[in-house]
């Protein structure tokens, strides 16, 4: 789409297509059981920096310079296609909960943390990256939120 000459004036269109693909990928992804919190409680605190979390198979991340979720939502069958194109870019988490795919706008810190998790980085590396992007990033709040919502579904300890 980015190279399709007739669509050149719609600079946001490739990102809207990425969002559509992420939605379909999330919808058709496998299932995963929630992370039992008691399994984390058994770990000694000195191992926390070496934790490597696992995302739910449906979890997709998308960053765009355009308000792609608003454009996508405005173009759903029950809507009129009118979207605020002057809105700022977005960081999105697309994930399936039960049978519903949800598109959520998230902050820079959360996006950076989840991206690092998706790249199989340790908690220490993921937190440092998130702190760099968002000075007041609250790691504990983010972990509680994403474990409770089923976005984070597992972990292992990095052996390095």
Image: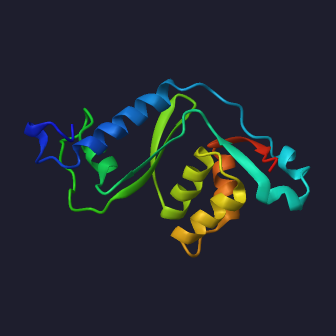
**Residue 128 is drawn in which quadrant?**
bottom right
Q: Position of residue 50 (x, y in %)?
A: 78, 54
| Residue 22 against residue 145 in the figure, above or below | above
Residue 58 placement: quadrant: top right
- The answer to whether residue 160 of the structure is visible from this angle is yes
At 12% across and 45% down in the image, what residue appears? 8
Using residue 136 as the reference point, say whether residue 82 is left or right of it. Answer: left
Nearest the viewer among 104 and 128 is: 128
At 28% from the left and 55% from the top, the residue drawn is 66
Q: Which colour scheme is used?
A: rainbow
- On the image, the x and y values in percent for residue 60 come to 49, 40
Q: Would residue 97 be found to the left or right of residue 160 on screen?
A: left
- Residue sitting nearer the eye, 158 or 57: 158
Q: List x then y, in percent, for residue 53.
A: 70, 46
Do we see residue 141 in this rendering? Answer: no
Q: Closer to the camera, 40 or 77?
A: 40
Quadrant assignment for the N terminus:
top left
| Residue in the image at 21% along x and 62% along y | 86
Is 130 placed left or right of 141 in the picture? left
Side (left or right) of 6 relative to 96: left
């Amino acid at each position: 789409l980015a190279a399709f000459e007739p669509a050149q004036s719609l600079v946001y269109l490739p990102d809207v297509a990425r969002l559509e693909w992420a939605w379909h990928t999330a919808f058709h992804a496998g299932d995963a059981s929630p992370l039992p919190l008691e399994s984390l409680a058994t770990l000694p605190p000195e191992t926390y920096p070496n934790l490597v979390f696992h995302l739910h198979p449906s979890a997709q991340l998308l960053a765009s310079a355009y308000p792609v979720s608003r454009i996508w939502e405005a173009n759903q069958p029950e809507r009129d296609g009118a979207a605020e194109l002057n809105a700022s870019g977005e960081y999105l988490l697309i994930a399936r909960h039960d049978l519903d795919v949800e598109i959520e706008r998230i902050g820079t810190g959360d996006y950076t943390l989840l991206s690092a998790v998706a790249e199989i980085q340790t908690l220490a590396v993921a937190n440092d990256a998130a702190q760099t992007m968002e000075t007041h990033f609250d790691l504990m709040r983010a972990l509680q939120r994403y474990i409770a919502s089923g976005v984070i579904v597992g972990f292992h300890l990095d052996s390095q």
